[in-house]
Image: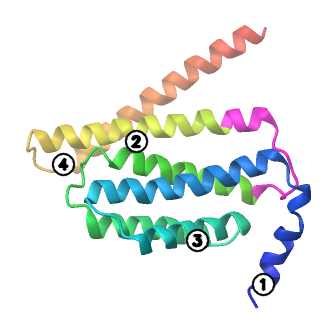
Amino acid sequence: MIWSPLQRPVLLVPRVPWQRWVLIGIAVVTATAASTFTALAGGHQTGVVLAVIVGLAIISVLLPDSHVATAVEVVVVLQWLATVEDATTAWAIPIASCLFAFHVVITLMALTPVTATVERSIVVRWSRRGCWIVVATIGMWSLVVAMAERHARGSVALTVAGFVTLMVLILMARAGRASSDHQAAR
């Protein structure tokens, strides 16, 4: 019966720290925002899809170590494929960012007990790494748009070169920041 796996987290509600409530809110809001942005990109929203997304997001925060979070992402991607015609639309960035934030928050929730408070340094480290991934996503999307605008023929080599260049630039920026942080700590 489905009630038994849901009963354990519900019984722990009085002992859940404020940080967990914030993570729950972020997960539900980012999943809902991804669906809403997809609807805006496609031109229309169906209440059924939004209700399914919200319901699955709520279940995924109750059971973060299950595959329900993957179902949320799959439904948003299917919504994207069914409604959006222009794959290079600027809406791709906030949708991808919302899905990424949802994924990171659910992962963090799955790694920690319900009553645990995550150290601030861990949250900051995860946030910084997440920001670098969003920057790389924006950079790659910009390359795709530039190639589409120029009506350039598809080139796997050019795409890989662009991705490697972005990766090297991000790693150089991180290494430069890490060395300056290390020197400041001395």
Disc with the residue nearer the chain's start (2 vs 1): 1
Q: Residue at x 60, y 57 (%)?
A: 28
For the residues carrying marks 2 and 3, which lies nearer the camera in this image? 3
For the residues carrying marks 2 and 1, which lies nearer the camera in this image? 1
- Observer able to see residue 90: yes
For the residues carrying marks 4 and 2, which lies nearer the camera in this image? 2
Q: Nearer the viewer, residue 147 or 179?
A: 147
Assess whether residue 113 is covered by the magenta stretch. Answer: yes
* SS for callout 1: helix
The count of marks equals 4
Say which residue label 2 marks. 137
State yes or no: discs 2 and 1 in contact (Cβ < 8 Å). no
Task: Kindly report the distance in space between the C-alpha atoms of the residues bearing marks 2 and 1.
Answer: 39 Å
- At label 4, the amino acid type is Ser
Task: Kindly report the distance in space between the C-alpha atoms of the residues bearing marks 4 and 2.
Answer: 19 Å
Say which residue label 4 marks. 155
Disc with the residue nearer the chain's start (1 vs 3): 1
Q: Residue at x 86, y 55 (%)?
A: 16
Say which residue label 3 marks. 55
* SS for callout 4: loop
State yes or no: discs 3 and 4 in contact (Cβ < 8 Å). no
Q: Is residue 132 above or below residue 178?
A: below
Say which residue label 1 marks. 3
* SS for callout 2: helix
Q: Determine crowd level at label 2: few under 14, some 14-19, many 20+ residues with C-alpha closer than 10 A.
A: some
Q: Determine crowd level at label 1: few under 14, some 14-19, many 20+ residues with C-alpha closer than 10 A.
A: few
Horizontal side of 95 relative to 5 (left or right) equals: left
